[in-house]
Image: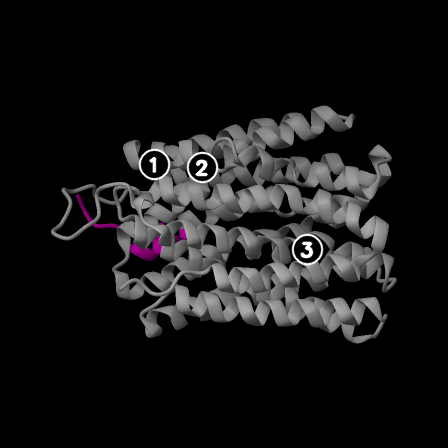
Amino acid sequence: MRTPNRWMMLSLGMAAQAAGCVFMYGLPFLLPLLRQELRLTLAQAGLIVGAPSAGMLFTLIAWGWLADRYGERLAMTLGLVLATVFLGCAAFTTTPVPLALLLALAGASGASANAASGRVVLGWFPAERRGVAMGWRQTAQPIGVAVAGAVLPPLGSLRGALLAMAAICLVTGIAVAALVVDPPRGTARSGERTGSPYRSAGLWRVHAASMLLVVPQFATAAFALTYLVAERHWDPAAAGRLVAVAQFAGAAGRLFCGRWSDRAGSRVRPMRQLALVNAGVMVLLALAVQFGTTAGTLLLIAALVVSMSGNGLAFTAVSEMAGPAWAGRALGGQNTVQNLAAAATPGVLGAMIGQIGFGAAFGLAGALALAAAFATPPDPA
């Protein structure tokens, strides 16, 4: 078999993950439409926004097992096709509960790319280039959210936005089916991990730190547009463009962090240091918002960028700690704990914001980022 271009495989994996991220993490851009068309409170709309992440919780490890056993192409293609079907059905739903259920099923289906695309990076890239490659892979999320921010609000209707998401998933699924080549699955090399990686504490600690770091990421991503419109009186379209630009800056931050980790020869040390920076920026943001200073907007953008920049470090650490035999399941577990926090964050913080304001919610997110720095494990001996 001819060896495919590894960057082409990475690009296809990124496209698959970005297509899922458009609806999984781009739904906050539809919060004003959800509230207007379905007459929901911010907390109720936040629960619908979190529905795809909730759906992912039930299938991520299963998709990882499928990718470990049968290959990345099958897992990603099947998931994207199913997501297309559920999003298409959701577009013609006009009541909150069925809409949330269909979005949860779409999330459960689109989860396939989260585990399988990570295996593509692990399989086709050597360790000394894996940080940058995984950094590129992790830019799929901010790119997907940026596309959502640029495309969805101007459509002006919930149905049009959901149909656009379905079309993106369908086109990407066809490309993956036609072009992705699974990495070879040879016998384990000497010294390569084949048993369960969960017998040591390191992998558990990376999962825990990542779960905590999801809260500042989603505190800013889910409510940035709402804060700018409700508190700073921005036009929704202009606010969407600003958040989209921040997503691209966050994507560049992930590449920088991947290069940083390759040069440092460590994934967890940069992860810990970035968590401390994340905590500091979130606390400053909370203070600026609480006192109504004009610095709140700039600090919000800084918090958006910093909170998403280190995501690839955790995924690279998880894939390397697990080894090829367990990478799909471990990445599925990593996504599970992250999406557990992602599913809860919009609803919980939406209720918190409604009661005591944005400043307290951002302050809580900063405290959890600080806890993540202490949860991150030391470098392996």
- Residue matched to label 1: 67
Q: Is residue 100 visible to us here? A: yes
In the drawing, does residue 372 fall left or right of residue 235?
left
Are discs 2 and 1 less than 8 Å apart at CB?
A: yes
> In this view of the protein, which residue sits in the foreground, 307 or 156?
307
Q: Judge whether residue 140 can be spotted in this image.
A: no
Within 10 Å of the Cα at label 3, are there few (<14), some (14-19), or many (20+) other Cα atoms? many
- Say whether disc 2 or disc 1 marks the residue closer to the N-terminus: 1
Is residue 14 part of the magenta span, yes or no? no
Q: Nearer the viewer, mark 3 or mark 1?
A: 3
Distance from disc 3 to disc 2, alpha carbons, whole Å, reads 25 Å
Checking the image for residue 364, the label placed there is: none
Asked whether 150 or 70 is in front, the reply is 70
Which residue is painted at 45% across and 46% down in the image?
334
Residue 83: x percent and y percent? 54, 32
Q: Which residue is mark 2?
A: 112
Q: Give the colouring mode of the picture.
A: one colour
**The residue stretch that appears in magenta:** 1-11
Instruction: Say which of marks 3 and 2 sits in front.
Output: 3
The amino acid type found where label 3 is placed reads Ala
Residue identified by numbered label 3: 219
Q: Secondary structure at mark 2?
A: helix
Q: Is residue 9 magenta?
A: yes
Q: Residue furthest left?
A: 190
Can you give x and y, in whole percent of width and height, for residue 15 in the image?
Answer: 47, 48
Task: Report the side of 67 relative to 78 (left or right).
Answer: left
- Which quadrant of the view contains residue 206? bottom left
